[in-house]
Image: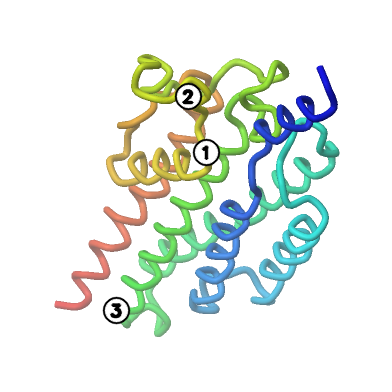
């Protein structure tokens, strides 16, 4: 194989980081928009913890590929863990303030606003999780180094529905998260591994709490 052919093969396996980076920036922005009573204090802590490594990765490693340093994936997963735990904290804080009301939750509109933010953040976070775990992550997905699939897409069942070199991208995983969060169950791609099922279960549970408990209570306050 010539150097030019090898470079072309390498580029075929590459995947841009920027869609996931934009999604994470959206999560940070949504987190900042939450009331102070629903975020970890000081309220600047989580955004700073997320932004510093994110900016660093976007400058130094803008594409995911099989030769990327292992620490880049470790940092990416660490960022997901932090923002995921922060969002779960917001869910429990909101439920706690509904069960033990004070002046901070008498505004039903603020409750609905907060519930929507938490729900949307949940969709984005788990879309990133699915993108990062499936078949070993975007750096090796579609290469000989990939692991067994965590999700079965329709294109995998019927290759005639997609080009020969098709592989899922970030938006495919974001759509899985959206449909799972909206329906509380998988609709597009089926989970195959225990970790995928566990993550989809957690995502659905957070969405269920947010939509069925928080939003319904907020609507009652508006009456």
Residue 137 horizontal/vertical position (percent): 65, 32
* Depth order, front residue of 128/167: 167
Badge 1 crowding class, 10 Å Cα cut-off, few under 14, some 14 to 19, many 20 or more, is some
Identify residue for label 2.
Answer: 151
Confirm or deny contact between disc 3 and disc 1 (CB under 8 A).
no
User: How far is mark 3 from mark 1, CA to CA?
Assistant: 36 Å
Task: Please tell me in which quadrant of the rendered image residue 99 appears.
Answer: bottom left
* Depth order, front residue of 21/62: 62
Residue 120 horizontal/vertical position (percent): 41, 58
Residue 169 marker: 1
**Relative horizontal placement of residue 120, taking residue 55 as reference (left or right):** left
Residue 199 horizontal/vertical position (percent): 51, 35
Residue found farthest to the left: 223
Identified at 45% across, 35% down, the residue is 200
Name the front one of labels 1 and 2.
1
Element type where label 2 sits in the image: strand
Badge 2 crowding class, 10 Å Cα cut-off, few under 14, some 14 to 19, many 20 or more, is many
Name the front one of labels 3 and 1.
1
Identify residue for label 3.
Answer: 109
Which quadrant of the rendered structure holds the N terminus?
Answer: top right
User: How far is mark 1 from mark 2, CA to CA?
Assistant: 13 Å
């Amino acid at each position: 194989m010539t150097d030019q052919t090898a470079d072309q093969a390498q580029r075929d396996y590459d995947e841009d980081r920027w869609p996931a980076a934009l999604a994470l920036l959206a999560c940070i922005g949504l987190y900042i928009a939450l009331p102070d009573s629903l975020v970890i204090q000081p309220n600047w802590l989580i955004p700073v913890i997320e932004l510093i490594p994110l900016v660093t990765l976007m400058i130094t490693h803008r594409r995911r590929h099989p030769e990327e340093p292992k620490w880049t994936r470790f940092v990416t997963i660490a960022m997901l863990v932090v923002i995921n735990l922060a969002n779960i904290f917001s869910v429990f804080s909101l439920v706690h303030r509904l069960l033990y009301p004070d002046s901070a939750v008498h505004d039903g509109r603020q409750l609905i606003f907060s519930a929507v933010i938490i729900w949307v953040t949940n969709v984005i976070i788990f879309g990133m999780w699915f993108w990062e775990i499936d078949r070993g992550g975007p750096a090796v997905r579609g290469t000989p180094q990939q692991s067994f699939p965590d999700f079965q897409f329709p294109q995998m069942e019927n290759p005639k529905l997609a080009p020969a070199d098709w592989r899922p991208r970030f938006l495919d995983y974001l759509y899985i998260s959206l449909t799972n969060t909206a329906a509380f169950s998988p609709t597009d791609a089926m989970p195959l591994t225990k970790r995928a099922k566990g993550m989809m279960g957690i995502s659905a549970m957070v969405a269920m709490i947010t939509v069925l408990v928080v939003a319904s209570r907020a609507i009652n306050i508006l009456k």
